[in-house]
């Protein structure tokens, strides 16, 4: 057990991270948000711009400052969805976020990075309260599963028809072409295998690697810090629940969710939330495992009711038919549904009208 803990636990304590980041000065960043009424784009309820692409054009107009100061953020309170006030250095990279404090003016709740990631879950900062998600979510919070994930676990998906990391990434990039240059949130990023690729691709102004699992995010940091270019790239690590995304409505250009839908406690709450944060024209791309009733001798209704009972008893993964996934996207207000299917693998994309 001790040996396992030794290999699977995060290798950098908060104090070590703090000292390794001391004196670090992040570069100026296009996502340093300024209230500039003349820039087109979605507005928060306070009339402040929150879209990453809008913020990019703000930077083109004015050279952004890099001093420690207070400013409004793209990141929003998970309780009331108001943009957070940030105090600290600019930038959506790990070191600058680590050195910043975030506060919701409405709830008066503060959010800090006690670890390598910024915790924007509702329960962040609680001292007594704890709750458990379904096993399909809790499993990935384990240090061992997080450690093994990119070291064999994920590669096993290929046996079910997943094309593999490089091909899945290329396919997703194709779907994301209409939102190139915008801000991408890699929801349920796991150890960040796709977040890192999106960040390195240069196709996005910034990437938020978001997951509910603390250990997946720590593992993601372990990979990031092995790559000098990534540590200063606009790649943020955020802990959040997919059913409560810490972004203002209509503020995100692209959402990716690789192999995650079947793990979510409520896929309908999650897709509704993804639809809420996407801006008009924003693109959602996801992969998951399909269950095709064609592969079972049962009619669809019998299959669905069996799945419901089985799922309730075992708390196992949520697998859907392709029709169900398309229906879910439509019922959450997404349009232009399209997909690629290979055996149990599906990559689908839908857009915010
Ligand atoms: C199978 S992994 C997928 C990782 C990666 N995206 C990929 O393509 O391999 C599923 C991920 O979903 C995350 N997850 C499960 N429930 C979640 C929730 N409620 N909110 C956010 N992420 C969640 C898990 O922590 C895990 O990292």
Image (tube, helix red, strand yellow):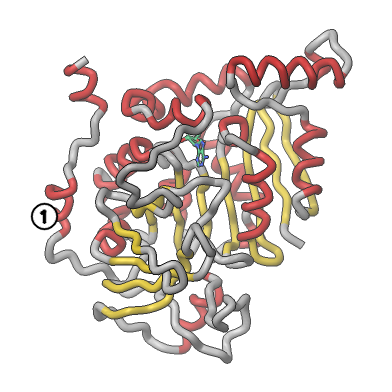
Residue 168 lies left or right of residue 31; in this view the side is right
Residue at x-position 11% and y-position 55%: 19
Q: Is residue 209 visible?
A: no
Q: Nearer the viewer, residue 199 or 240?
A: 240
Residue found at x 68% / y 25%: 319
Q: Residue furthest bottom?
A: 38
Q: Nearer the viewer, residue 133 or 152?
A: 133
Query: From where the camera sits, is residue 159 visible?
Result: yes
Closest to the observer, 26 or 87:
87
The residue beneath circle 1 is 19
Instruction: Tell me if mark 1 has few (under 14), some (14-19) or many (20+) residues whose alpha carbon lies within 10 angstroms of its own.
Output: few
Instruction: Kindly identify the residue that appears in the image at 40 percent across and 52 percent down.
Output: 238
Give the image location of residue 36, x and y in percent.
51, 88
The C terminus is located in which quarter? bottom right
Q: Position of residue 35 (x, y in %)?
A: 48, 85
Q: Residue furthest front?
A: 128
Q: Is residue 227 left or right of residue 266?
A: left
Q: Is residue 290 above or below residue 77?
A: above
Question: Relative to residue 219, is residue 126 depicted above or below?
Answer: below
Per the image, label 1 sits on a secondary structure element best described as helix
Image label count: 1
Q: Is residue 294 above or below residue 44?
A: above
Q: Position of residue 313 (x, y in %)?
A: 62, 15
**What residue is at 27 percent from the left and 72 percent from the top?**
88
Q: Quadrant of residue 296?
A: top right
Q: Position of residue 256 (x, y in %)?
A: 57, 47
Q: Quadrant of the N terminus?
A: top left
């Amino acid at each position: 057990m001790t040996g396992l803990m030794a290999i699977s636990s995060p290798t950098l304590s908060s104090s070590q991270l703090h000292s390794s980041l001391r004196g670090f000065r992040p570069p100026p960043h296009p996502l340093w948000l300024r209230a500039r009424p003349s820039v087109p784009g979605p507005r928060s309820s306070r009339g402040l711009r929150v879209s990453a692409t809008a913020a990019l054009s703000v930077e083109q107009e004015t050279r952004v400052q890099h001093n420690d100061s207070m400013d409004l953020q793209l990141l929003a309170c998970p309780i009331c969805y108001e943009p957070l006030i940030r105090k600290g250095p600019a930038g959506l990279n790990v070191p600058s976020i680590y050195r910043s404090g975030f506060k919701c003016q409405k709830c008066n709740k503060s959010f800090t990075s006690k670890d390598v990631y910024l915790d924007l879950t509702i329960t962040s900062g609680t001292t007594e309260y704890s709750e458990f998600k379904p096993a399909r979510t809790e499993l990935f919070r384990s240090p061992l599963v997080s450690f093994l994930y990119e070291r064999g676990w994920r590669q096993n998906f290929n046996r079910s028809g997943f094309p593999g990391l490089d091909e899945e990434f290329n396919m997703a990039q194709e779907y994301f072409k209409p939102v190139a240059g915008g801000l991408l949130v890699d929801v349920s990023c796991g150890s960040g295998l796709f977040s890192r690729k999106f960040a390195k691709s240069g196709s996005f102004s910034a990437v938020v690697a978001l997951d509910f699992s603390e250990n997946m995010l720590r593992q993601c940091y372990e990979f990031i810090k092995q790559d000098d270019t990534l540590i200063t790239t606009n790649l943020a690590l955020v802990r959040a629940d997919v059913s409560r995304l810490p972004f203002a409505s209509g503020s995100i250009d692209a959402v990716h969710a690789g192999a995650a839908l079947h793990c979510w406690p409520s896929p309908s709450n999650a897709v509704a939330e993804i639809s809420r944060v996407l801006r008009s024209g924003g693109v959602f791309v996801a992969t998951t495992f399909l269950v095709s009733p064609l592969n079972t001798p049962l009619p669809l209704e019998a299959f669905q009711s069996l799945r419901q009972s089985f799922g309730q008893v075992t708390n196992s993964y949520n697998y859907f038919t392709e029709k169900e996934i398309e229906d879910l996207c439509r019922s959450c207000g997404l349009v232009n549904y399209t997909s690629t299917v290979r055996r149990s693998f599906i990559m689908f994309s839908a857009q915010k009208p």
